[in-house]
């Protein structure tokens, strides 16, 4: 190239202001951090994928610790159901963009740091570009496609991936993509196939759990920055909150790993929805079953039609609210189908209409013909017919 | 050999809600067979139709992945702990789409539907 190269300039020496010294004094007086470590934190660039349950303690602790540049990626808005665990947000934040509410909270916590927000959904199109400006990526997402996307983008861009995930009372944490260490695909080469899909009833999480697992991720991130102690590279930490038990298993780098192995077959980002079978699953879920809207159902009930209301939610959901239906949880339906009379008109419902669509599809396979799915479930019933029915 | 099999949260509904099950077995394969003999619903969650362990289910003897031992032929000794560790993906929103195990969308072919009355 003919262009003149500029001589390398010495980076301005990074120092701490008097205010920062006071703010970080409990770090500075620890030999494991000290001035050297605090300056490393100040120069660190960490990208948080997700500002929700895991992202909340991550953002708060990393900001408080003085990580100099935090990036926040989220496309979502704060709603009331988030407040049970996403402690970055307050009640007045409901309806706001999560990245904006989080930026305000973290900037208030520590105005000394730089915060960049990306109000977007992480995708194969933007991941590598987003990762470029950061040293460490922290995965606080909540679905398989994004997990695999974060992993592959980290491996392809040589970034460390601080991983945590939760389910109900159980958590996992590890550090993937560290030079020489395993990646998420070494642990789980493939996602669950589309044939086995979650049902809504499987959701739910105890609010403290992401607090614990996200805090573990924050600790690992800080140790990676400080280059101190032993991180979770090569280990998968398993946490069972109900038993209050931590265990760990060994992780190995898989030489045949499709993305980080010696002969990788994944050399660029792919379509992760398709990889996880989501697209096919969505198609399957739109398999049309006969539907009835809440208003139509109300009209028919009001005129005295003898409809049999089948509630396919779980018993603990029935306790929250119900429409007076006959409760058979979706999972019990195959063996309790004899409780239903196929000569009667049946309306199946759940919370949102997804599980009951499965129930209707199943019952139609079993020969039921006079059966409808309540469109939008109990949520739509509350919106359109009876606002006294609580939404959850 | 008396060994303990630890059941992860997503599989507990199919294992009588137990967090662990004690079995007697000489190999990992035997231990899993014994587990399935006690809790038949676990089979389709642990194994593919071709009889192989599902790829998103990892099995460990103590803290070692059986893929790097002798897989299901891995021998056991008294007091070993077997962990079944499925992939879980939850984190941000309590999204239900976060665990590998749940009900298939339609009843699996083997699941008998009682004959209709009319």
Image (tube, helix red, strand yellow):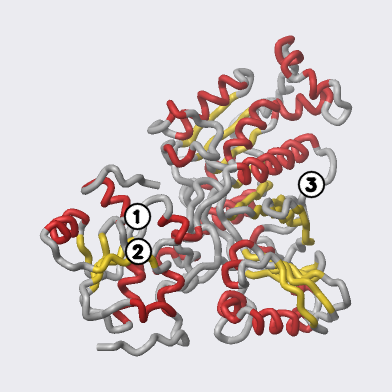
Which of the 4 image quadrants contains residue A133? top right
- Tell me how many marks there are: 3
CA distance for labels 1 and 3: 48 Å
Tag 3 and tag 2, C-beta contact below 8 Å:
no
Pointer 1 residue: A322
Taking depth in this image into account, of A295 and A258 the one nearest to the observer is A295
Pointer 2 residue: A311
* Chain letter for the residue marked with disc 1 in the picture: A
* Residue at horizontal 48 percent and vertical 36 percent from the top: A118
CA distance for labels 3 and 2: 47 Å
Taking depth in this image into account, of A116 and A322 the one nearest to the observer is A322
In the figure, is residue A48 to the left or right of A375? right
- Percent x, y for residue A146? 52, 53
Taking depth in this image into account, of A167 and B15 the one nearest to the observer is B15
In the figure, is residue A341 to the left or right of A81? left
Taking depth in this image into account, of B45 and B48 the one nearest to the observer is B45
The local crowd at label 2, few if under 14, some if 14 to 19, many if 20 or more residues have their Cα within 10 Å, is many
Position of A330 relative to A154 (above/below): below
- Percent x, y for residue A389? 31, 46
Q: Earlier in the sequence, mark 1 or mark 3?
A: 3
* Residue at horizontal 49 percent and vertical 71 percent from the top: A196
* Residue at horizontal 43 percent and vertical 55 percent from the top: A317
CA distance for labels 1 and 2: 8 Å
* Secondary structure at numbered mark 2: strand
* Secondary structure at numbered mark 1: loop
* Secondary structure at numbered mark 3: loop
Pointer 3 residue: A231
């Amino acid at each position: 190239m003919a262009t003149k190269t500029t001589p390398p300039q010495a980076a301005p020496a990074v120092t701490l202001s008097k205010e920062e010294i006071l703010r970080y004094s409990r770090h500075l007086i620890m030999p494991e951090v000290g001035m050297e470590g605090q300056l490393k934190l100040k120069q660190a660039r960490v990208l948080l994928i997700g500002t929700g349950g895991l992202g909340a303690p991550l953002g708060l602790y990393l900001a408080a610790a003085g990580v100099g540049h935090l990036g926040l990626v989220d496309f979502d808005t704060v709603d009331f159901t988030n407040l049970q665990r996403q402690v970055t947000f307050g009640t007045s934040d409901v309806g706001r963009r999560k990245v904006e509410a989080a930026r305000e909270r973290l900037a208030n916590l520590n105005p000394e740091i730089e915060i960049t927000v990306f109000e977007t959904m992480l995708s194969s199109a933007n991941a590598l570009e987003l990762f470029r400006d950061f040293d460490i990526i922290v995965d606080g997402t909540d679905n398989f496609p994004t997990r695999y996307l974060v992993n592959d983008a980290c491996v392809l861009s040589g970034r460390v991936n601080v991983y945590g995930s939760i389910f109900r009372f159980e958590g996992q944490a590890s550090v993937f993509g560290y030079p020489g260490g395993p990646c998420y695909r070494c642990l789980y080469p493939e996602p669950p196939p589309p044939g086995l899909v979650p049902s809504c009833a499987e959701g739910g999480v105890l609010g403290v759990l992401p607090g614990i697992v996200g805090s573990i991720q924050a600790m690992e991130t800080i140790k990676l920055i400080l280059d101190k102690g032993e991180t979770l590279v090569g280990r998968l930490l398993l946490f069972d909150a109900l038993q209050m038990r931590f265990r760990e298993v060994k992780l190995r780098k898989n030489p045949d790993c499709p993305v980080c192995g010696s002969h990788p077959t994944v050399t660029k980002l792919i379509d992760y929805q398709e990889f996880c079978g989501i697209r096919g699953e969505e198609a399957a879920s739109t398999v049309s079953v006969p539907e009835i809207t809440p208003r139509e159902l109300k009209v028919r009930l009001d005129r005295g039609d003898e409809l049999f209301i089948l509630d396919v939610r779980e018993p603990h959901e029935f306790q929250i609210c119900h429409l007076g239906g006959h409760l058979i949880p979706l999972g019990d339906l195959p063996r309790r189908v004899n409780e239903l009379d196929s000569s009667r008109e049946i309306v199946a419902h759940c919370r949102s209409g997804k599980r009951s669509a499965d129930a209707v599809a199943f019952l139609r396979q079993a020969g039921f013909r006079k059966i409808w799915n309540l469109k939008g479930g109990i949520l739509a019933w509350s919106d359109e017919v009876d606002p006294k029915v609580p939404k959850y | 050999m008396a060994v303990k099999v630890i059941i992860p949260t997503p599989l507990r509904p199919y294992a009588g809600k137990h967090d662990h099950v004690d079995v007697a077995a000489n190999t990992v394969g035997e231990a899993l067979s014994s587990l399935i003999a006690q809790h038949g619903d676990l089979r389709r969650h642990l194994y593919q139709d071709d009889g192989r362990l599902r790829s998103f289910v990892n099995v460990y003897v103590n803290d070692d992945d059986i893929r790097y031992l002798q897989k299901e032929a891995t021998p056991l000794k008294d007091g070993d702990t077997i962990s079944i560790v499925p992939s879980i993906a939850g984190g941000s929103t309590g999204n239900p789409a976060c665990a590998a195990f749940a009900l298939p969308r339609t009843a699996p072919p083997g699941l008998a539907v009682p004959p209709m009355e009319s």
